[in-house]
Structure formats: structure tokens, C-alpha cells
Amino acid sequence: TVNAYKTPNADFTTLLTKVSEIGGIKRIRFTSPHPRHYTNELIDVLLNNPKVCHYAHIPLQSGSDAILKKMRRQHNMEQYMTVIEQLRSRDPYYAISTDVICGFVGETEEDFEQTIKAFEACQFDTAYMFIYSPRKGTESYKETEILTPEEKLARHTRLVELQNAITLKRNQMMMGRTEEILVEASSTRDATEFVGKTDNFKKVIFKPEEGRIIKPGDYVKVKIDDIRGWTLRGTLIND
């Protein structure tokens, strides 16, 4: 819960601002914030400080308040949706990823439907989706499971299919945009191409023109003109 950071003289908003003032730092990204610790002041810095990336990984875990309470997540869906709406209303391209557990012990069909509705409402760019399994030493381990492995898998499959469609839709929004890319490395599939990330943490592959030297750590302008799988591809723009 990185955004819960607090000292007698500063909070996470202050910390981000001070880090952004350090020379040589161009991008700031962090993980994982907790929906309970977003404030209006923090959201203003996230959206208005040009060095803070427009991306956040905000764990959801479940769309059901009853399950969230069992998990002791310390947030509810109203709080969660307020954060998403504040970020996306001011920047529709603000990228959000999440974590979710399918088939948590005691999860009813209605609980799972609430998770489906949450995914539809939040329109996550990506999601890490897991099937619940009991672990000794946890409180949930003491409970009797109401779902079979097949039922948990069916819920997971349904959620993955939904998220795949949403991810494609969110990636399609990037088509035609010119983005500044932070170059990370040569492509593993084609050494003549490079891979990097946009400000909103989208993976982009591009090929430099002959004779231009590009290396990891460089910033380049790329026009997004193709999607292959979950990866964006683009054409390098001369500055």
C-alpha cells in the first residue's frame, strides 16, 4: 500500500513531488497503491505532474463487498469505483491494471457476477486473474469450499475471455496516436526491432530507420499503427 506512505512532515503526494524535482528523472511509476489511500491531492499530482506516469496497478481481488470484507481488503466497491472514475474522467487513456481471485472460499454466483460487473465498469487495460486455492495457515483454509475445481475454472475462463475483449478495446484506442516511448531492449523475436513502453505502460515494438542508433534508455516518438496480439506496433517519428 505504497500510497499510505506518511511521515510527520510528508505523505505520498509530497514524496512524488519531491522525487519529480530530482534532476535526470523523467518518468515515475509505482506499485501497488490501495484504493483506500487515494486522496484528491494525490489524484491531482498523478494527473498533472508530467513526470508521473498515467498508469496504476490497483488490486481489486473481487467485485463483491461481502468477499472483500472476508478478504479483509479494507476497501469497498464504492471507494474503488470513485478512484477509477476520478482518474478516467480526466484522462480516458489512463491505464489501470488489477489483480482478482476467482472462486474465493464462500464466493456465490451473485458474488462472482459482481466481479463481472466490476470488470465491465472499470475497463481494465490488463488484469492478473487467479483461481483460489486453499493455503494452510490462512483463515479461509478453515472454511469448507462450496465450489468444485471445475466451477472455479469455469468462472476464471469467463473472466479471462471478458478481459481479453476489454484489453483489445483499450489497445485499439491507441491506434493513430503518437506516443513517447521509453526504449527498453531489442525485440526478442527480431533483433532489428526495439521494444519499449508508453507513458501509460503499453508495450510497443518499432523498427528504427537504417543508420539511426537507438539504445535502451532512449526516448523516441512512435506513431501507433498496428496491433499484434496484445502488443502495439508503431512507426518511428523523426524529431
Image (cartoon, grey):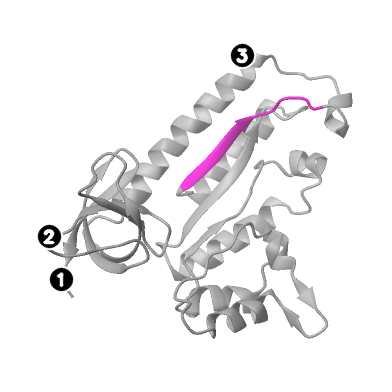
Quick check: 165 left or right of 46?
A: left
Give the SS element for disc 3.
helix
Magenta residues span 126-135
| Residue type (three-letter) at the residue carrying disc 2 | Glu
Question: In the image, which is nearer the foreground, mark 3 or mark 2?
Answer: 2
**Mark 3 nearby-residue class (10 Å; few <14, some 14–19, many ≥20):** few
Q: Is residue 192 shown left or right of residue 77?
A: left
Q: Distance between the residues labelled 3 and 1?
A: 53 Å
In the picture, measured across the screen, residue 159 lies left or right of residue 14, that is left
Task: Sort mark 1 into few (<14), some (14-19) or many (20+) by Cα contacts within 10 Å.
Answer: few
| Of the pair 213 and 56, the residue shown nearer to us | 213
Front label number (3 vs 1): 1
Residue that mark 3 sits on:
150
Q: What residue type is labelled 1?
A: Asn
Three-letter residue code for mark 3 = Glu
- Find residue 102 and report its horizontal and vertical position in percent: 64, 30
Percent coordinates x, y for residue 180 in the rendering: 31, 68
Up the image or down, 45 lies above or below 101; here it is below
Residue found at x 51% / y 70%: 28
Query: Circle 2 is placed at which residue position?
Result: 209
Q: Which residue is drawn at 75% across and 38% down?
A: 67
Image quadrant containing the C terminus? bottom left
User: Can you tell which mark lies on residue 238?
Assistant: 1
Principal SS element in the magenta part?
A: strand
First in sequence: mark 2 or mark 1?
Answer: 2
| Tags 2 and 1 touching, CB below 8 Å | yes
Q: In this view, does 6 lie above or below 149?
A: below
Residue at 58% over, 73% down: 43
Residue 12 in picture, x, y percent from top left:
68, 74
